[in-house]
Image: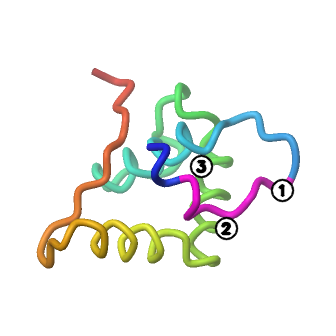
């Protein structure tokens, strides 16, 4: 996960949910196709997850991540991004 740090915008102030935990929550929602409010509380408030997803998406962070990992691994078809699943 430390390899993802350069891809994300700097926090807008004091953050109560760290970036790694928020990113894992965003992946959790996207993997399951769930609503934001259905995210387990361990990832942080659902509103925070949505706001981070929106802000990071608008700034192109997810595009940078995929491009950066794909360029670094020479894989054209599949790029896997690790996440922590706190529900198991």
Q: In which quarter of the view is residue 57 placed?
A: bottom right
Q: Which residue appears at 29% of the width and 52% of the height?
A: 31
Q: Is residue 60 placed above or below 46 in the rendered structure?
A: below
Q: For this view, does 36 lie left or right of residue 71?
A: right
Viewer-proximal residue among 4 and 41: 4
Residue 57 numbered tag: none
| Residue 9 magenta-highlighted | yes
Report helix, strand or loop for mark 2: helix
Q: Which residue appears at 64% of the width and 57% of the height?
A: 52
Report helix, strand or loop for mark 1: loop
Reading the image, the residue beneath label 1 is: 12
Distance from Cα at disc 3 to Cα at disc 2: 10 Å
Badge 1 or badge 3: first in the primary sequence = 1
Reading the image, the residue beneath label 3 is: 49
Q: Which residue appears at 43% of the width and 67% of the height?
A: 65
Reading the image, the residue beneath label 2 is: 55
Range of magenta residues: 5-12
Q: Is residue 84 placed above or below 13 in the rendered structure?
A: above
Quadrant location, the N terminus: top left
Distance from Cα at disc 2 to Cα at disc 1: 10 Å
How far across and down, in percent of the image, does residue 64 sit? 47, 74
């Amino acid at each position: 996960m430390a390899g993802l740090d350069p891809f994300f915008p700097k926090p807008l102030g004091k953050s109560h949910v760290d970036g790694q935990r928020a990113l894992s929550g965003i992946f959790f929602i996207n993997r399951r196709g769930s609503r934001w409010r259905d995210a387990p509380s361990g990832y942080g408030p659902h509103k925070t997850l949505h706001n981070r997803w929106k802000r990071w998406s608008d700034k192109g962070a997810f595009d940078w991540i995929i491009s950066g990992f794909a360029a670094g691994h020479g894989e054209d078809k599949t790029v896997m991004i690790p996440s922590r699943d706190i529900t198991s």
